[in-house]
Image (tube, helix red, strand yellow):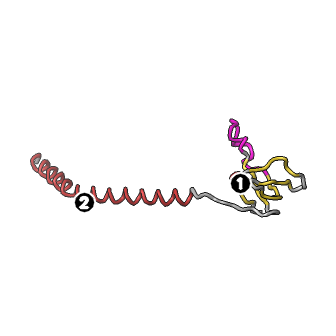
Amino acid sequence: MASSLYFHLITWCARQLQKRIDDLQLMEEKVVKARYNSIKHFEATHKITNHNFAPGDLVLVHNSQVEAELNQKTKPQYLGPMVVLRRTTGGSYLLAKLDGAVSRLCYAAFRLIPYLP
């Protein structure tokens, strides 16, 4: 009885060793496919967005002061909406609040995102 059990165990191990080459090839194909999918996902989600806002467009300003604070989850991530007055020669934007108050600051283009009401 025991010899029969050992015989089945040895034959099972021999079959597994015969399949090893196929299994390794299958694993390699899966790894390569996963890498390409990861690259596609990264490229799709990490695109550089270049918005050219016209005067009168509504935008939100990223609140970068919140990033340094400990309670950043409870603070607003964006300020606004604000109205674009003009684009400066350096590429930053002069903005105004909706009530007409003009901001003394010029905001870098990377901090602005379009406001979609």
Q: Which circle marks residue 17 in the picture? A: none
- Position of the C terminus by quadrant: bottom right
For this view, does 9 lie left or right of residue 25? left
Mark 1 surroundings within 10 Å by alpha-carbon count, few (fewer than 14), some (14 through 19), many (20 or more): some
Query: Where does residue 90 sit, x and y in percent of width and height?
Result: 73, 53
Q: Is residue 74 magenta?
A: yes
> Label 2 sits on what residue type?
Asp
Mark 2 surroundings within 10 Å by alpha-carbon count, few (fewer than 14), some (14 through 19), many (20 or more): few
Residue visible at 80% across and 55% down in the picture: 81
Q: Of the residues tagged 2 and 1, which is closer to the observer?
A: 1
What secondary structure is found at the residue carrying circle 2? helix
Q: Label 2, label 1: how many angstroms apart (C-alpha)?
A: 53 Å
Region rendered in magenta: 64-79
What secondary structure is found at the residue carrying circle 1? helix
Q: Which circle marks residue 22 in the picture? A: 2
Query: Where does residue 61 sit, x and y in percent of width and height?
Result: 75, 51
> Label 1 sits on what residue type?
Ala
Question: Mark 1 = which residue?
Answer: 109
Pointer 2 with pointer 1, Cβ within 8 A:
no
Q: Is residue 109 magenta?
A: no
For this view, does 15 lie left or right of residue 80? left
The picture quadrant where one finds residue 66 is: top right
Q: Earlier in the sequence, mark 2 or mark 1?
A: 2
Residue visible at 41% across and 57% down in the picture: 34
Extreme residue toward the front, this view: 89
Residue visible at 75% across and 60% down in the picture: 115
Query: Where does residue 77 sit, x and y in percent of width and height?
Result: 72, 47
Q: How many numbered marks appear?
A: 2
Residue visible at 28% across and 59% down in the picture: 25
